[in-house]
C-alpha cells in the first residue's frame, strides 16, 4: 500500500506540556491535543485522535528512521525524544520533535507545592470517608444490638415478676391453708368421718 508523506503534524510546547496538532481526515481541519508526557502513552494519543474523528480507522506511530512501529505502551515522553511518523488511515505524517523544554527551579518548586497540597487533600478526604464509613458501621451494629436486647429486657422484667410472685413474703393466703386438715386429701377426710361415726354407733 502506498502512503502519502506529509509534514503537516507539528509539536510545540506550552507551559511545559507538549501540544501536537493533527489534521483530521473527515473534517479536513486541524485539531490540537495537549499531552501529558509522563502519565500518557502513545496508545492514549492514538485513541484521542480516533475519538475526535470517527473517520479515523487506523492510527499508528512509527519510528522516524526505520519506520518500526512504536508500542502503544510507550510513554509520550519517550515518543518525543526523537522524530517519528504518524500514520492516519492511508496518510503518513513525518513529525519533527522540538527540543524538550526544561522546567525552571521556580516552576519545579511550584509543582512540588501543588503536588503536596493535592496529596494532603487526598489524605484528608480519605480520612473523612473512612470516618463516615466506620460511623455507619457502628450505628448499624448499635441498632442490631438494640433490637436483640429488647426481648432480653422483656423473659428480665418477666423473670423479676415471677420471682416476686414466688416470694413467701409477697403471698397473702388464709391461715387455714397451713392447718393439718388442709394437708389431707378429701378421701382421707371422708374415711375419718366414717370411722368416727362407727365408733359413736358402737358406744350408743
Image: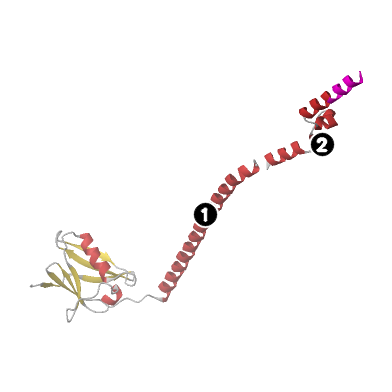
Looking at the image, the residue that sits furthest to the bottom is 66
Q: Check residue 196 for magenta coloring.
A: yes
Query: In the rendering, at what x and y percent does residue 100 appear?
Result: 30, 77
Along the viewing direction, whichever of 184 and 113 lies nearer the viewer: 184
Along the viewing direction, whichever of 103 and 188 lies nearer the viewer: 188
Q: Which image quarter holds the N terminus?
A: bottom left
Residue at image position (12%, 69%) is 91
Above or below: residue 151 compared with residue 182? below
In the image, the segment drawn in magenta is 195-204
Q: Image check: 195 left or right of 140?
A: right
Secondary structure beneath disc 1? helix
**C-alpha distance separating marks 2 and 1:** 55 Å
Above or below: residue 122 compared with residue 67? above
Q: Image check: 121 left or right of 35?
A: right
Proximity of marks 2 and 1: CB atoms separated by less than 8 Å: no
Q: Specify whether residue 172 is in view.
A: no
Q: Specify whether residue 101 is in view.
A: yes
> Residue 105, located in which quarter of the rendered image?
bottom left
Q: Check residue 200 for magenta coloring.
A: yes
> Residue 107, located in which quarter of the rendered image?
bottom left
The label nearer to you, 2 versus 1, is 2
Residue at image position (32%, 76%) is 101
- What residue is pinned by disc 1? 132
Q: Report the magenta stretch's main SS.
A: helix
> Residue 70, located in which quarter of the rendered image?
bottom left
Q: Image check: 107 left or right of 51?
A: right
- What residue is pinned by disc 2? 169
Looking at the image, the residue that sits furthest to the left is 2
Amino acid at each position: 500500500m502506498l502512503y502519502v508523506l506529509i509534514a503537516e503534524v507539528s509539536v510545540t510546547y506550552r507551559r511545559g506540556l507538549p501540544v501536537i496538532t493533527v489534521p483530521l481526515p473527515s473534517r479536513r481541519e486541524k485539531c490540537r491535543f495537549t499531552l501529558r508526557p509522563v502519565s500518557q502513552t502513545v496508545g492514549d494519543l492514538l485513541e484521542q485522535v480516533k475519538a475526535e474523528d470517527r473517520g479515523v480507522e487506523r492510527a499508528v506511530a512509527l519510528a522516524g528512521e526505520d519506520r518500526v512501529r512504536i508500542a502503544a505502551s510507550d510513554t509520550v515522553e519517550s515518543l518525543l525524544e526523537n522524530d517519528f511518523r504518524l500514520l492516519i488511515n492511508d496518510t503518513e505524517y513525518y513529525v519533527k520533535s522540538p527540543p524538550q523544554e526544561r522546567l525552571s527551579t521556580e516552576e519545579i518548586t511550584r509543582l512540588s507545592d501543588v503536588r503536596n497540597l493535592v496529596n494532603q487533600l487526598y489524605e484528608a478526604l480519605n480520612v473523612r470517608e473512612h470516618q463516615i464509613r466506620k460511623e455507619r458501621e457502628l450505628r448499624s451494629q448499635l441498632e442490631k444490638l438494640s433490637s436483640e436486647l429488647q426481648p432480653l429486657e422483656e423473659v428480665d422484667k418477666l423473670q423479676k415478676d415471677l420471682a416476686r410472685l414466688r416470694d413467701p413474703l409477697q403471698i397473702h393466703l388464709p391461715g387455714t391453708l397451713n392447718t393439718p386438715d388442709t394437708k389431707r386429701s378429701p378421701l382421707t377426710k371422708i374415711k375419718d368421718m366414717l370411722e368416727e361415726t362407727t365408733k359413736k354407733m358402737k358406744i350408743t
